[in-house]
Amino acid sequence: MSTQTTFQTARRLVLVLTATAWLGACATVQKPLSIADTIANSPSLSTLSGLVKSAGLTETLQGAGPFTVFAPSNEAFKAVPAATMQDLGKDPAKLKNLLTYHAVSGALLAKDVKNSNAKALNGDTLALSKAGDFVTVENAAVTQADVVATNGVIHIVDAVMTPPKK
């Protein structure tokens, strides 16, 4: 074999190995997830993830959407009295009402929030406010904004919001 043929063979081998490595790296890149799956994969939202499952909302939050979810962190749920959490665990309708109070139709990025009201998925009204980059919804402050999912956006908040009594 000539030197040129050996060089061409070695070059092809390097190209094949490079392409294989590149394709392998692409295969490990995580594809975008739905809101439900993003919540389930976020350690700081594990309490919310369990409650979404208990309320039967997983399929909804994996659906087409788009939705905006104001997701209380685990820390936010720690501030809820234990008796209230137990009561929610025993009443799926009340739990579903609470959780759907934390979501609205449409994908609303933080930059698009205006001082206004939005209709929650449970039918109640949420007060949205923005001052500079600081966004609040009702009594909760957004601590991490714009977690984009395939079917909307999640904003992590520091409080669990309570729907108005009916």
Image: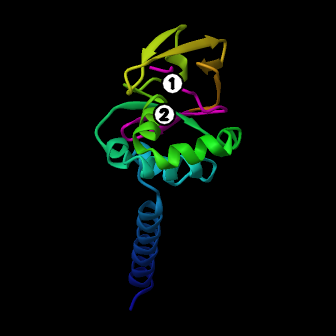
The residue pinned by badge 2 equals: 98
The x, y position of residue 84, in whole percent, is 60, 40
Is the Cβ of the residue at disc 2 closer than 8 Å to that at disc 1? yes
Q: Is tag 2's residue or tag 1's residue first in the polypeptide sequence?
A: 2
From what the image shows, is residue 99 above or below residue 107? below
**As shown in the figure, which amino acid type bears the numbered disc 1?**
Pro
Q: Is residue 162 magenta?
A: yes
Quadrant showing the N terminus: bottom left
Residue at figure coordinates x 46%, y 74% from the top left:
14
Res. 10 image quadrant = bottom left
Residue at figure coordinates x 58%, y 50% from the top left:
47
Kindly identify which numbered label has been placed on residue 163.
1
Q: Nearer the viewer, residue 133 or 17?
A: 133
The x, y position of residue 82, in whole percent, is 67, 45
Q: Is residue 118 magenta?
A: no
**As shown in the figure, which amino acid type bears the numbered disc 2?**
Leu
Horizontal arrangement in the rendering, residue 118 relative to residue 81 (left or right): left
Q: Residue furthest left?
A: 64
User: Magenta residues, as a range?
Assistant: 146-166
Q: Nearer the viewer, residue 62 or 9?
A: 62
Numbered disc 1: secondary structure: loop
Q: Please tell me how crowded label 2 is: few (under 14), some (14-19), or many (20+) other residues with Cα within 10 Å.
A: many
Horizontal arrangement in the rendering, residue 130 relative to residue 165 (left or right): right
From what the image shows, is residue 23 above or below residue 121? below
